[in-house]
Image (cartoon, helix red, strand yellow):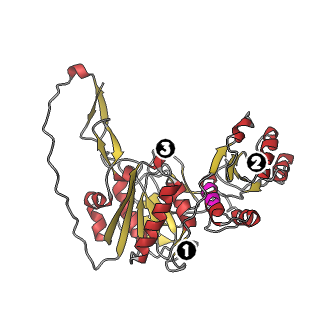
Amino acid sequence: MAVVKMDSGYNIGVPPGVCTFIERPSPGAVKPYEVAQNSSLPTLSIVSTGGTIASRIDYRTGSVTSQFNASDILVAIPELAEIANYRTIPLATILSENMTPAIWQDLARAVCKEIQGGSQGIIVTHGTDTMAYSAAALSFMVDTPVPVVFVGSQRSADRPSSDNAMNAVCAAAAATSDLGEIAVVMHASTNDDRCAIHRGTRVRKMHTSRRDAFRSMGIAPLGHVEYPSRTVTLTPEAVRRGTHKLALHEKLEPHCALIQFFPGMSPDLLKGFEGYRGLVISGTGLGHTSTVLLPELRRLTDTGTMVVMTSQCMNGRVCDRVYDTGRDLLGAGVIEGGDMLPEAALVKLMWVLGNEKNNKKAQILMQTDLKGECNRRSAHGL
């Protein structure tokens, strides 16, 4: 089957027998095109890690692949030049499933370097599939006095319904606002009318392909960016610009893992985490696993693995003091993760164990709200 890219941006399959192959000469080198910058506007930095927002057609497969760098984004979205003066840093060119803790560390260093160099806001282009992990990781690694905004695209630029341009423009507007923390900016609805600003430790991708896939979990969004006016409105809960002094805490413990409990789960699966420094479990309901896992969990905690319990539920908090299963888990040395999202708990555990060697202090840090990842009380209706 031959894959043909249509003008609409979609692909169709055509039997090879009805195709005529025409060989065309390879195009020559394209002269780089530079977007005119306005030095009177605020200075922002675009740190590109790849993803759908920075993708182009791959004629080898007929799909799209991450190939653009940050400068290409400015060429593709001219409206950005009306908002700020940009510096571009092509940190990586990957799809987000290939993100690693080592790249998080590179990203944290790059963000701090740009802020030290006078950037008034940072835009991080990132694939959507693991963007919540990266935003949470950077939230713990960087104390920022300026907005650090993650942005991506659910649909690639070759599709008529692409959200890349509007998301990027709204991200730039948020990066010039009074925001003073790390956030994710993506479509707030299926319409092209506004983007939501989500806290980096409380956001999750909730749909595979909808443009409004991202949701703030357990809290309301920190604000919105109206489009096309680019008006930014922040809630009182949003950290304001200049609240924190710049600081980099880049150490991470990579030997941590996240596992989801399921009915019939064998204790043998837990043996694969022998020697790990930390393990987050996404348990059922209030934070439970089956009782057959208790001996293996106890063995892990006795040998130095910190085990943190979170919930598979979208809202609410872990409480292992209601049922006997929960009390037995606490007796086995498992730590309650409150209302932390499992992915936020994982990157927090990496950060805590990378920066605190005392086990008791590390346990206290895991249950302390550091970057808005733990709500003291669950909001009504959330």
In the image, residue 295 sits, relative to residue 191, either above or below, namely: above
359 with respect to 138 (left or right): right
Q: Earlier in the sequence, mark 3 or mark 1?
A: 3
226 with respect to 287 (left or right): left
Q: Earlier in the sequence, mark 1 or mark 2?
A: 1
Residue 196 visible somewhere in the drawing: no
In the image, residue 93 sits, relative to residue 116, either above or below, namely: above
Whether the residues at callouts 3 and 2 have beta carbons within 8 Å, the answer is no
Whether the residues at callouts 3 and 1 have beta carbons within 8 Å, the answer is no
Percent across and percent down for residue 353 are 66, 61
Frontmost of labels 3 and 2 is 2
In the image, residue 342 sits, relative to residue 222, either above or below, namely: above
Residue 328 visible somewhere in the drawing: yes
Magenta span includes 146: no
Percent across and percent down for residue 275 are 69, 48
**Mark 3, residues whose alpha carbon is within 10 Å: few (<14), some, or many (≥20)?**
few
Rounded to the nearest angstrom, the CA distance separating label 1 from label 2 is 38 Å
Question: Which mark is on residue 300?
Answer: 2
Residue linked to disc 1 = 239
Percent across and percent down for residue 336 are 75, 56
Q: Provide the secondary structure element on which disc 3 rests.
A: loop
Task: Check the picture and name the quadrant holding the C terminus.
Answer: bottom right
Residue linked to disc 3 = 208
Q: What amino acid is found at the position of numbered circle 1 in the picture?
A: Val
Q: Provide the secondary structure element on which disc 1 rests.
A: loop
Q: Main secondary structure of the magenta part?
A: helix
Q: How many marks?
A: 3
Magenta span includes 347: yes
Q: What amino acid is found at the position of numbered circle 2 in the picture?
A: Leu
Frontmost of labels 1 and 2 is 2
Q: Residue at x 72, y 36 (%)?
A: 268
Numbered range of the magenta stretch: 346-350
